[in-house]
Image: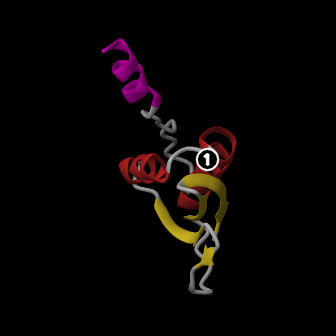
Amino acid sequence: MENNKFEAERFKFTIPKDDFATDEQKAQIWTEYLHESLNRFPKDKVIEILKDQNQIYRIVKEDDNSYMITQDLMPNRINLEFENGYLTNSYLG
């Protein structure tokens, strides 16, 4: 039971609210956080965390499949790449 509690707590993340931060700045913080802390996390957990934080994201690559993506630049959108079900890369776009 204690192990399950630890696992549940491990996936609770928050970014401090800053009324002066733009959406782009918040997305940059999240991208750095994903790259440094959530790299190699399971896909479902990464998506769950991003949804909980109301972050805009899209999956651009899974394993050897690169998806067709629009060329519009959204500085507050996080692009995600997964390999074998785990996050391997994230960047803004």
Q: Is residue 4 left or right of residue 80?
A: left
44 w.r.t. 12: above or below: below
Residue under the image location 35 percent in, 22 percent down: 4
52 w.r.t. 92: above or below: above
Q: Is residue 37 left or right of residue 3?
A: right
Report the predominant secondary structure element of the magenta stretch: helix
Image location (x, y in percent) of residue 79: 59, 66
Residue under the image location 51 percent in, 36 percent down: 16
Q: Is residue 8 magenta?
A: yes
The amino acid marked with disc number 1 is: Leu
Element type at mark 1: helix
Residue under the image location 37 percent in, 28 percent down: 8
Q: Is residue 5 magenta?
A: yes
Magenta range: 1-10
Q: Nearer the viewer, residue 35 or 17?
A: 35
Q: Quadrant of residue 63?
A: bottom right
75 w.r.t. 23: above or below: below
Image location (x, y in percent) of residue 43: 49, 53
Q: Which residue is mark 1?
A: 34
Q: Nearer the viewer, residue 56 or 35?
A: 35
